[in-house]
Image: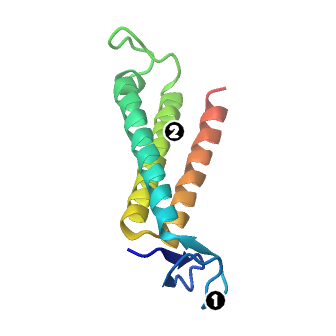
Amino acid sequence: MPDLSVCNAPTCAVTVEGTLAACPKCGGPMRAVREARWRGWVLLILGVFLALFMGGITWSLMPSLARPGEAVDGGSFAGTAEQARLVLYLFYAVIAFGAVTAANGLYQIVTGRQHWAFVLLTLLVLAGLILAVVLAMQGLK
């Protein structure tokens, strides 16, 4: 199979054979398909790890966060109900970021290219994660 290059410009996105630095159609930068697939594997592995790891933490802490102040399974959350909700929202935001990252990686592995919609969705979920961190930090003071 010959090497393929894909234009990074979202309006062009032309695919050509060979390894090129500039797009022959629009002059934009080109990326090798191999590179997108390699980055896709990294995104998939990190996204799945993040979603599963944070999901496990959420699962194990859910009983004590659902009933703050009460002893549940030998431990308790000492904060208020509002603080427990903030912690859960932060956990959910991390899980969502991991899931979107994994989906983005899977798309790159399958197609060999990066789609602008996944980039936008990832940035929106990242903004939500940053907002959750800021709110949690303010609420847990």
Relative image position of residue 84 (x, y in whole percent): 48, 29
Q: Quadrant of the N terminus?
A: bottom left
Under circle 1, the secondary element is: loop
Is 89 in front, or is 32? 32
Q: Position of residue 82 (x, y in %)?
A: 52, 31
The amino acid at mark 1 is Cys
Task: Please say if 29 is above or below 66.
Answer: below
Secondary structure found at label 2: helix
Crowding at dot 1, Cα within 10 Å, few <14 / some 14-19 / many 20+, comes out as few
Sequence-earlier tag: 2 or 1: 1
Residue at 57% from the left image edge and 71% from the top image edge: 31
Task: Tell me if 40 is positioned left or right of 132 in this view.
Answer: left
119 left or right, relative to 57:
right
Q: Nearer the viewer, mark 2 or mark 1?
A: 1
Residue 52: quadrant of the picture: top left
Q: Residue furthest bottom?
A: 25
Q: Nearer the viewer, residue 105 or 29?
A: 29
Which of the numbered marks, if any, corresponds to residue 26?
A: 1
Q: Vertically, is 38 above or below 115?
A: above
**Residue 47 placement (x, y as % from top left):** 44, 47
Q: Residue at x 57, y 59 (%)?
A: 123
At x 43%, y 57%, the residue is 105
What distance separates the C-alpha of mark 2 from that of mark 1? 42 Å
| Whether label 2 touches label 1, CB < 8 Å | no
Report which quarter residue 22 is drawn in.
Answer: bottom right
Colour theme: rainbow
Other residues around mark 2 within 10 Å, as few (<14) / some (14–19) / many (≥20): many
The residue singled out by tag 2 in the image is 90
- Identify the residue at horizontal 52%, vertical 77% (top origin): 6
Furthest toward the top, the residue is: 74
Q: Is residue 127 above or below residue 12?
A: above
